[in-house]
Amino acid sequence: QSALTQPASVSGSPGQSITISCTGTSRDVGGYNYVSWYQQYPGKAPKLMIYDVSNRPSGVSNRFSGSKSGNTASLTISGLQADDEAVYYCSSYTYTSTYLFGTGTEVTVV
Amino acid sequence: QVQLVESGGGVVQPGTSLRLSCAASGFPFRTYGMQWVRQAPGKGLEWLTVISNDGRIRYYADSVKGRFTVSRDNSENMVFLQMNSLRAEDTAVYYCAKEGTWLHIDHWGQGTLVTVSS
């Protein structure tokens, strides 16, 4: 049960768009449309941003969008803002009915 | 609104046991599965276990299988994590989490810190 692979860090300027990748296998990301994304600020609990690959919960900005191609899922943040600075984790349901989280990506707004 | 409040964390010695509790409110508890996730200091999230809404189905991460046991009391809106044979590498913040409609976490507790140290 290895963690899903994410880039350690991604940065962008205010107003730009960034994309965070989340790579797994056909037994998790590629096999199910049950990928979710979480935002976590330091010392705080994670917050759901995207579920079922591309669905946004009520209250989450439409600047956040999700997609998937093969074994890789992606989170795109458009119109980057200062308060988007956080760590983002992907998660996927797996073929053993368990879950995996990604390694986490620190987003920096420069 | 959904509230999940963990308790039971603390400092324990290696090889001992600890039981975490999570009090849930603000939603029909018996309708939803519940999960536990942990985060070691300065590290990423690690999924631990899920229990179905009726408590009959449970799955565990390999890292805790055989040592940790999840349970729930639907009459009290509580979920528990019994942790045995604790190791230094179990040191982490433990989060209780509510499942969404299907196969994802939609709400998290604030976490409780467990430190395993001699």
Image: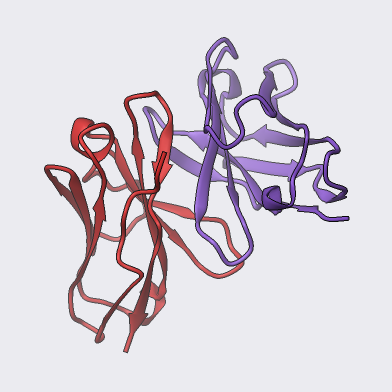
> Residue A92, located in which quarter of the rendered image?
top left
In the depicted structure, whether residue A79 falls above or below residue B3: below
The colour scheme used to paint the residues is by chain
Q: Nearer the viewer, residue B80 or B85?
A: B85
- In the rendered image, which quarter contains the N terminus of chain A? top left
Q: Residue A70, percent across and down?
A: 12, 42
Q: Is A50 above or below relative to A18?
A: above
Q: Quadrant of residue B17?
A: top right
Q: Within the image, what quadrant is residue A7 found in?
A: bottom left
Name the residue rendered at 38%, 24% in the picture: A96
Q: Is residue A84 left or right of residue B68?
A: left
User: Could you tell me which residue is drawn at 25 percent across and 44 percent down?
Assistant: A55
Image coordinates for residue B110, horizontal then vertical, percent: 65, 52
Identity of the residue furthest to the left in this view? A69
Q: Residue at x 52, y 47 (%)?
A: B46
Identify the image quadrant of the C terminus of chain A. Answer: bottom left
Q: Residue at x 52, y 24 (%)?
A: B33
Left or right of residue B18, residue B66 in this image: left
Q: How many marks?
A: 0
Horizontal arrangement in the rendering, residue A60 relative to residue A78 (left or right): right
Percent across and percent down for residue B36 are 59, 37
**Relative to residue A81, is residue A44 drawn left or right?**
right
Q: Residue A12 location in percent, x, y?
A: 25, 82
Q: Chain B hue?
A: purple
Among the chains pictured, the one given red colouring is A
Is A88 rendered above or below residue A37?
Answer: below
